[in-house]
Image (cartoon, rainbow, N blue to C red):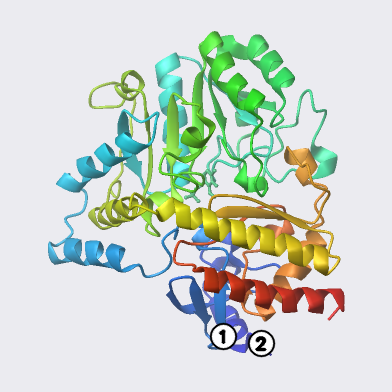
Amino acid sequence: MLHHRSQQQFELARQSLAGGVASSTRVNKALGHPLYFERAAGCRLWDLDGREYLDLCCSHGATLLGHGDERIRRAIEKSLDNGAPCSYENADHAALAATLCEVVPCLEKVRYTCSGSEATMHCLRLARAFTGKTKILKLEGNFHGYHDQVMFSINTPADKLGAETSPTAFPASQGMPAALADQLVLVPYNNVELLAAALAKHAHELAAVICEPIYYNAGCIIPTAEFATALRELTTKHGVLLIFDEVLSAFRMGPGGAQEYLKITPDLCTLGKAVGGGYPLSAFGGRTDIMARLMPQGDCQHSGTYNGHPLVVAAALAAVRAYLEPGFYEHIRLVGEQLFSGLNQLFEKHHVPAHVRGLGARFGVYFAQPGIHDYRGALTHDRTKMLKFIAVAIAEGVYFHDYGGAACHHGFCAATTRADVAEILSRLERALVQMQNGE
Ligand SMILES: Cc1ncc(COP(=O)(O)O)c(C=O)c1O
């Protein structure tokens, strides 16, 4: 058995962890159990059975520098040596905020949270406090974390979608008050006409439009220039705030994230994953006049014992400084080009009906026709084939997270060299041969 010790560990974990895992989505559906990683370095992982993997999950995008980066380790060790005084202010807080404000176009002021979910939660509260309105316009299928305000209309099954003109606010979990669905107005991604109609109808009750500026949670869907422009122009026209949820897109393709790439500046944004370099820091921020509503200056609460923990802020500062080093994004671009085009060539060579679309260090693999531009299109992707592909890739030593087989995001880290990409492609070629032979 390939993963004997992982399976044994899963059995043990089931005795004390709910469902055998620390977080719901960690059972890899392609395997039927989690892979337990004992060790990691750069772009490589080793499981309990001693098998080596090239990592194309990269902590869902958090470890953009790779695992065990020396610069981050040194920053954390220095903070530990200083006693890591937790729940107090320190000089790194402002140093990191100043750097973020320099590189992310919309940021004039910043606050920290521990997760992306908390960042979107606080950002939405702030938008409501600032505008005095309560509803939120959300794009169908976009993911903004695990709190009750936003966990509607994600992973919605095809038969529950409703009409495109009024998508259903289908709950992605039990336990959320149904009344919260009434606080959402839903519009399909990349549909300017329906966005304009929804804003014209609901502007008087909408605090904000929140969106994934690059829709990586459906693989890699880039908004059309018309849609991106409409998001900015229409929200401004109707007095509704525009929030870019850059938890996943921040630092992915450039220091200024998706807003720099699209040349669209939102009023507020969230940052997560890569900003902490693999440690639990997220952030939200934006216009000074809006951020001034936060206590103690204003009347909107945002606080927390672990907000801006010294270890993770030190890690984030080291990570962000590394992203700003010359040549960093040129390397990401070259590795991305080699990986995406190499994988597309392999699919073609082995007659596998799939294609890759990527931007920066993340990409989607679609077992579907090209041209997907929204959630409904992403549902045409064949999840069964994707899970089969992931299973054979893992057997050959390339790790993908499963995301239930859905069209979702995968990615590489900056520690991946061009030689590593060649190794990934050669392992994946063996995997595709296995897949086509039905092994
Ligand atoms: C766009 C986006 N927003 C928010 C979140 C939630 O972040 P976290 O898992 O850190 O709570 C995610 C996580 O994948 C995300 O992709």
Lateral position of residue 304 relative to residue 217, left or right:
left
Query: Where does the image place residue 363, in percent across and percent down from the top left?
Result: 62, 53
Residue closest to the eye, 262 or 390: 262
Lateral position of residue 179 relative to residue 301, left or right:
right
Tell us which disc is closer to us: 1 or 2. Answer: 1
- Is the CB of mark 2 within 8 Å of ligand 1? no
Residue 256 can be seen, yes or no:
yes
- Quadrant in which the C terminus appears: bottom right
Query: Where does the image place residue 20, in percent across and percent down from the top left?
Result: 58, 71
Residue 195 picture quarter: top right
- Quadrant in which the N terminus appears: bottom right
Residue 286 picture quarter: top left
Which one is earlier in the sequence, the residue at label 1 or at label 2? 2
Residue closest to the eye, 284 or 423: 423
Q: Which residue position holds label 2?
A: 2
Q: Amino acid at mark 2?
A: Leu
Residue closest to the eye, 46 or 5: 46
Task: Please tell me the numbered disc located at residue 438.
Answer: none
Q: Which structural element holds mark 1?
A: loop
Query: Where does the image place residue 276, in percent across and percent down from the top left?
Result: 37, 53
Crowding around mark 2 (Cα neighbors within 10 Å: few <14, some 14 to 19, many 20+) is few
Residue closest to the eye, 164 or 63: 63
Residue 179 can be seen, yes or no:
no
Cα separation between marks 1 and 2 = 9 Å
Q: Which residue position holds label 1?
A: 51
Q: Decide: is 2 above or below 107.
A: below
Lateral position of residue 207 relative to residue 439, left or right:
left
Residue at horizontal 51 percent and vertical 81 percent from the top: 46
Q: Are marks 1 and 2 in contact (CB under 8 Å)?
A: yes
